[in-house]
Image: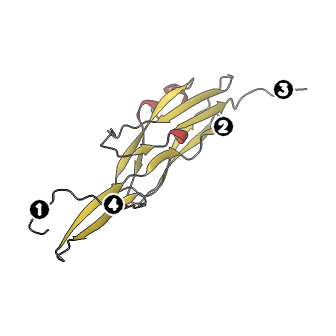
Amino acid sequence: INGATLSEVTAGEFEANLVPGSHTIDWQTEDTSGNTAVTTQDVWVYPSIAFKAATQTIGESQSALLTLKLSGTSPFYPFDVNIFVAGGGISNEDVTEDLNSLVVSFSEGETEKTLELIFPDDTTAEPSETLSLLITDDFNSAPGNESWTVDAAQNTHVITVVDANAAPNFV
């Protein structure tokens, strides 16, 4: 503008409260002579990912439903969220799914998705067992290259499995 090319323009007190998703921002500037320049900028705002609930208790021969939620729509689909075992005494022998490869896949427009884990009855009387699951940020986020945000307050889900064949206690 005014015969000079600007490589960078600073927007004074510009503030945009953009919801998660894909947005296009149109920028326009005008100099004192009335010359204008216009450009567009695509902005992706990534939603945060969290478990919908922190805990659940089920009996053997029941299913645990793990619901993951996004804080809004994603700027792109499809994408996968990996869930890792963070602890507990439950192993692959106690559940029908492979605990080493738990993945939740989100399709176009989805902001909530449920994964079912089936715990068959092993007919052995035993104390309650737990399985602690964790959403970790494996989306290559780094300072200056942020993408997904895993909600640290809701990134863990603990399933307690009680023995369905426990003998009754008579009092």
Which label sits in the foreground, 1 or 3? 1
- The three-letter code of the residue at mark 3 reads Asn
Give the class, few, some or many, for how many residues have Cα within 10 Å of label 3's Cα (few <14, many ≥20). few
Q: Amino acid at mark 2?
A: Thr
Question: Mark 1 to mark 2: distance in Å?
Answer: 64 Å
Asked whether disc 1 touches disc 3, contact meaning CB atoms under 8 Å apart, the reply is no
Where is the N terminus found, in terms of image quarters? bottom left
Q: Which numbered disc, 4 or 2, marks the residue that appears first in the sequence?
A: 4
Q: Residue 29 in the image: x percent, y percent?
A: 23, 69
Mark whose residue sits in front, 1 or 2: 1
Crowd tier of the residue under label 1, counting other residues whose Cα lies within 10 Å: few below 14, some 14–19, many 20 or above: few
First of labels 3, 2 by sequence position: 2
| Residue type highlighted by circle 1 | Thr
Residue 96 visible (yes or no): no
Direction bottom: furthest residue = 34
What is the quadrant of residue 132 in the picture?
top right
Q: Which residue is mark 3?
A: 169
- What residue is pinned by disc 1? 5
Residue 107 placed where, x, y %?
38, 55
Residue lying furthest right: 171
Comparing labels 3 and 4, the label whose residue is closer to the camera: 4
Give above or below for 165 relative to 28. above
Label 1–label 2 contact, CB within 8 A:
no
Residue labelled with disc 2: 57
Q: Is the residue under label 2 in contact with that under label 4 (CB below 8 Å)?
A: no
- Indicate the position of residue 160 as horizontal and vertical percent values: 63, 32
Taking the image as shown, residue 77 lies to the left or right of residue 35, namely: right
Of marks 3 and 2, the one in the foreground: 2
Along the polypeptide, which appears first: circle 1 or circle 3?
1
* Amino acid type, callout 4: Gly
